[in-house]
Amino acid sequence: MKRLIYGIGMALAALVIFVVPILAVALPDDPPTIAARYAWRNVLETGDFLLIIEENTPYASTPDVNYSDAFIWRLIDTDGTTELGQAQGYNYFESGYGYNIISFYFAAADAPTWAQNYYLRLSGVPTAFSPTPTYNFGMTDSDYSALTVSADVQADIAATIISLASDLEDRWALSTANALVTQDEAGAYLSPSGQAFFRGAVYGLQAMAPGAFPVVIGNINTTGRDWNTTYATSLASQNAGTFIDDGLQAGEDFFDVDWNLMGMLIIMGIGFGLLLAHWKIAGGNLWRGFTEFAAPLVIGMRLGLMGAGEVALIVGLCWLFISAKVWRVI
């Protein structure tokens, strides 16, 4: 009997010691609000659904319980009852209270019907409140993006994230050292602090909005290029039926050839004339005048006076010569 009484006493003591305490959180100082709502589709795959909201659950004094342990966000169907998804706030600043970012993502197989008037519901967790508070917010047509191409959608998400980050900087009164956005000559990106917050608030954001990050990881296009002579042919035939074509044909007849030898001799004559003039007037520097020589080659090719293939050959020879001089091969 003593052993039985002792065992029951120990069991009751264990229950008293290990009982989970009920958390007590006061209601928000003012009713929570949603500052902005953004919905996109075709983010990572055709037919998926991303919803990002900027919300405010105001407390003058931050509760001891983290926001994610006290509140939960739900996306509710148009009937006002059916739950489509849940999301929790990220406990980054002030334990998650005040202004925060909440996100819902659905793959294409689970995505709700697009552009419906759904409800967003903020509910208190039963272990933190008694009774639990509930706040409802309706979605409208203006919350949905009209973009459908994934590249455009991701660019718009990136721009929105940078805008939200700048807004939170002001609302949170962050110092420069803790700023969420970094500005440089290439544009605005999430700072290390911004990345730490938004990657927690919007899971998978780096894939959804790569433009919001300073480093983008992608696949290099290694597909071989299909080379052709379309451009060279169009240049050679652009003067067909004009007096220029008559002159070029007369040059071919004069030299008894079937290609534009006359045009090439004219361009080369202009180029060498400029080169020799530089050497004669400005001195004997053999490199002087080569820049001016290049202009007649490019202009003549564009006018159809010289073939693109011949110009490419000259450019290739010059490149080999310059490389050999730089590496002191010759």
Image: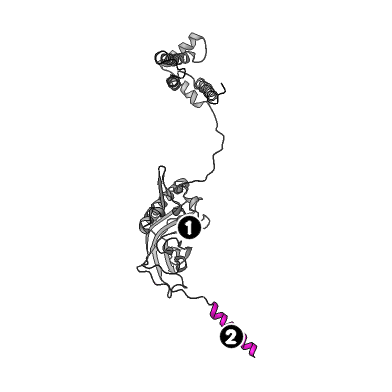
Q: Quadrant of the C terminus?
A: top right
Quick check: 328 left or right of 286?
right
Q: Quadrant of the N terminus?
A: bottom right
Q: Residue furthest bottom?
A: 1
| Residue placed under numbered mark 1 in the picture | 200
Give percent across and percent down for residue 276.
43, 13
Disc 2: CA contacts within 10 A as few (<14), some (14-19) or many (>=20): few
- Viewer can see residue 43: no
User: For the residue marked with disc 1, what is the amino acid?
Assistant: Gly
| Residue placed under numbered mark 2 in the picture | 9
Closer-to-camera residue (99/114): 99
Closer-to-camera residue (134/16): 16
N-term mark: 2 or 1: 2
Res. 219 mark: none
Give percent across and percent down for residue 208.
48, 51
Determine whether the residue tagged by mark 2 lies in a helix, strand or loop.
Answer: helix
User: For the residue marked with disc 2, what is the amino acid?
Assistant: Gly
Q: Quadrant of residue 285?
A: top left
- Assess whether residue 11 is covered by the magenta stretch: yes
Give percent across and percent down for residue 56.
38, 62
Residue drawn at (56%, 80%) of the image: 15
Closer-to-camera residue (138/87): 87
Question: Does 92 sit above or below residue 186?
Answer: below
- Assess whether residue 75 is covered by the magenta stretch: no
What is the CA distance from the residue labelled 2 to the residue labelled 1? 46 Å
Span shown in magenta: 1-28
Residue drawn at (50%, 9%) of the image: 255
- Viewer can see residue 14: yes
Determine whether the residue tagged by mark 1 lies in a helix, strand or loop.
Answer: helix
**Colour scheme:** one colour
Q: Quadrant of residue 167?
A: bottom left
Disc 1: CA contacts within 10 A as few (<14), some (14-19) or many (>=20): some
